[in-house]
Image (cartoon, rainbow, N blue to C red):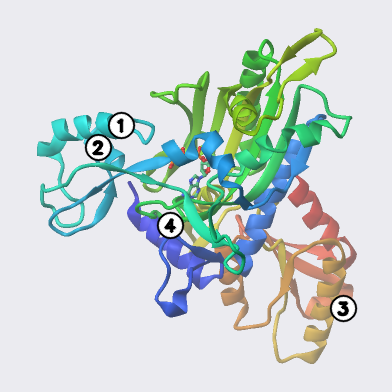
């Protein structure tokens, strides 16, 4: 566990405009964060790579479904009755915890899918060994299942003021639109529906920065496939989802597969891709083979026939579903942790984010060597304009000395810095500095953009 690394990342995120605590000027609001300018760019890169990876598939449709949904959706999906976390309160300091997380610390396996009775039994057996992480006392109450669904009210000015659920996952929006998408006519089984969107969960103890938020974003894909072909398709998706992380430049040794020990009753198989975060190995993405449970439930509750007639095999069946589900926020925390490094350059310590160039929030920074030389500033502005025509986003920076500017850009992971100096005024070349090595080379102004573009596309 490297909690100091997490603290350093959190402070860098605030200082350099990646992530701000939600509602900060009012004292903060637990489990929420705002993306700053750099975080917004990084988020955009994550969504772009995921979307492009999904677009590589022939039969992939995209959807953007509502956050507010009829309560029946969550009844059918089982979220109203079963989407809960086991909460336990310390009777001494009154802090709330997830019982499965406390058990995990002492090596006892339990999870949120267990019933209240099951988890209470396990918790009771381990009470002697369980200390409150906040006050250290051994005095916990009973474990209670707490619903994760966030509620709101709609229709206040009409006769009926109804309680509605904010979606707890984006997947249900896909299931309830599966027939609509199919009726377009050009999709046939097997096909997938992909969606990026916000989800909301009443997490008991939002913590570990971006890892467990109450408002977060999911990138989910549901692949509808015939029951016979589903097992092979599941293996293909597992392979593909692990390979996908090469695109993001994530260190291979920091990723691993973990199979679920307690499958929910309807699931055929379930594996998670875990990343070794500064606080240990944890779920980044779920790749789950869910059988026909979701569509069957919606058929039962809505009365709409979800069966598909397969022209090829002349069979009617409810398609099986393979789901890939990954959080934008957990991806970003992974990228930050993976890229964070400290080294020494020219005898000076520096903090550096070694993002793969395509993921870097800012692709290049352009500087005039000196701020108070109008000729240099004018030329640097010209170079900035030229590069910006081809590469975005880039920044112009003339604040502080050149060393400070380099360090600032290293800290946000900008792969290239372009400096306009006195030689530029003579020969139209600039200095191109590489973030990782600090190496500088002279490049013709007209070629700068293409050199940077090539590196980004690698
Ligand atoms: P966990 O066991 O860590 O609570 P989960 O199994 O409930 O996660 P899923 O329901 O499978 O998570 O959600 C799919 C993905 O959504 C997760 O792999 C994760 O990347 C992301 N995710 C889930 N809950 C949160 C959260 N509270 N904050 C940020 N991302 C989340």
- Give the vertical position of 105 relative to 370 (above or below): above
Q: Secondary structure at mark 1?
A: loop
Residue identifier under label 4: 209
Question: Of marks 4 and 3, which one's residue comes earlier in the chain?
Answer: 4
Labels 1 and 2 touching (C-beta < 8 A):
yes
- Rendered image: mark on residue 103: 2
Locate residue 82 relative to residue 99 in the image: left or right: right
For the residues labelled 4 and 3, the Cα–Cα distance comes to 50 Å
Q: How many marks?
A: 4
Q: Of helix, strand and loop, which one carries label 3? A: helix
Question: Residue 408, position in %: x, y?
Answer: 57, 71
Helix, strand or loop status at disc 2 = helix
Based on the displayed image, in which of its 4 quarters is residue 173 positioned?
top right
Residue 381 on image: x %, y %: 81, 80
- Nearest to the eye among marks 4 and 2: give it: 2
At 20% from the left edge and 51% from the top edge, which residue is drawn? 133
- Count residues near mark 2 (Cα–Cα under 10 Å), then give few for <14, some for 14-19, many for 20+: many
Whether residue 237 is visible, yes or no, is: yes
> Which residue is identified by label 3?
426
Asked if residue 263 is positioned above or below residue 330 in the image, the reply reads above
Q: Which residue is mark 1?
A: 110
Q: Earlier in the sequence, mark 2 or mark 3?
A: 2
**Mark 4 or 1, closer to the camera:** 1
Left or right, residue 260 beside residue 185: left
């Amino acid at each position: 566990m490297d909690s100091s690394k997490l603290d350093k990342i959190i402070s860098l995120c605030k200082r350099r405009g990646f992530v701000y605590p939600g509602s900060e000027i009012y004292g903060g609001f637990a489990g929420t964060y705002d993306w700053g300018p750099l975080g917004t760019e990084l988020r955009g890169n994550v969504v772009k790579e995921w979307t492009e990876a999904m677009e590589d598939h022939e039969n992939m449709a995209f959807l953007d479904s509502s956050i507010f949904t009829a309560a029946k959706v969550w009844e059918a999906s089982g979220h109203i009755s079963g989407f809960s976390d086991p909460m336990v309160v310390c009777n001494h300091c009154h802090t709330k915890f997830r019982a499965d997380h406390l058990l995990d610390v002492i090596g006892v396996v339990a999870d949120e899918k267990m019933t209240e009775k099951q988890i209470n039994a396990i918790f009771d057996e381990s009470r002697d060994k369980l200390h409150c992480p906040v006050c250290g006392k051994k005095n916990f109450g009973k474990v209670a299942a707490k619903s994760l669904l966030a509620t709101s009210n709609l229709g206040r000015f009409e006769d009926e003021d109804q309680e509605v659920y904010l979606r707890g996952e984006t997947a249900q929006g896909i299931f309830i639109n599966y027939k609509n998408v199919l009726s377009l006519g050009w999709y046939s089984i097997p096909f997938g529906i992909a969606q990026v969107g916000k989800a909301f969960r009443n997490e008991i103890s939002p913590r570990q920065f971006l890892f467990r938020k109450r408002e977060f974003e999911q990138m989910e894909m549901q692949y509808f496939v015939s029951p016979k072909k589903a097992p092979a398709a599941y293996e293909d998706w597992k392979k593909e989802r692990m390979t996908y992380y090469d695109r993001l430049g994530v260190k291979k040794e920091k990723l691993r597969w973990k199979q679920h020990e307690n499958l929910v009753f309807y699931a055929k198989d379930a594996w998670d891709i875990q990343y070794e975060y500064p606080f240990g190995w944890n779920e980044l993405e779920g790749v789950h083979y869910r059988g026909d449970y979701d569509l069957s439930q919606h058929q039962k509750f809505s009365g709409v026939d979800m069966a598909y007639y397969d022209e090829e095999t002349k069979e009617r069946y409810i398609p099986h579903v393979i789901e890939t589900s990954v959080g934008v926020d957990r991806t970003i925390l992974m990228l930050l942790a993976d890229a964070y490094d400290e080294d020494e350059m020219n005898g000076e310590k520096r903090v550096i984010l070694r993002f793969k160039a395509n993921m870097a929030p800012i692709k290049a920074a352009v500087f005039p060597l000196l701020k108070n030389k109008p000729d240099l500033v004018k030329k640097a502005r010209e170079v900035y304009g030229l590069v910006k025509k081809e590469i975005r986003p880039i920044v112009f920076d003339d604040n502080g000395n050149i060393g400070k500017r380099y360090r600032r850009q290293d800290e946000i992971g900008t792969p290239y810095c372009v400096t306009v100096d006195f030689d530029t005024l003579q020969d139209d070349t600039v200095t191109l500095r590489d973030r990782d090595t600090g190496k500088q080379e002279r490049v013709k102004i007209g070629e700068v953009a293409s050199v940077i573009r090539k590196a980004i596309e690698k």
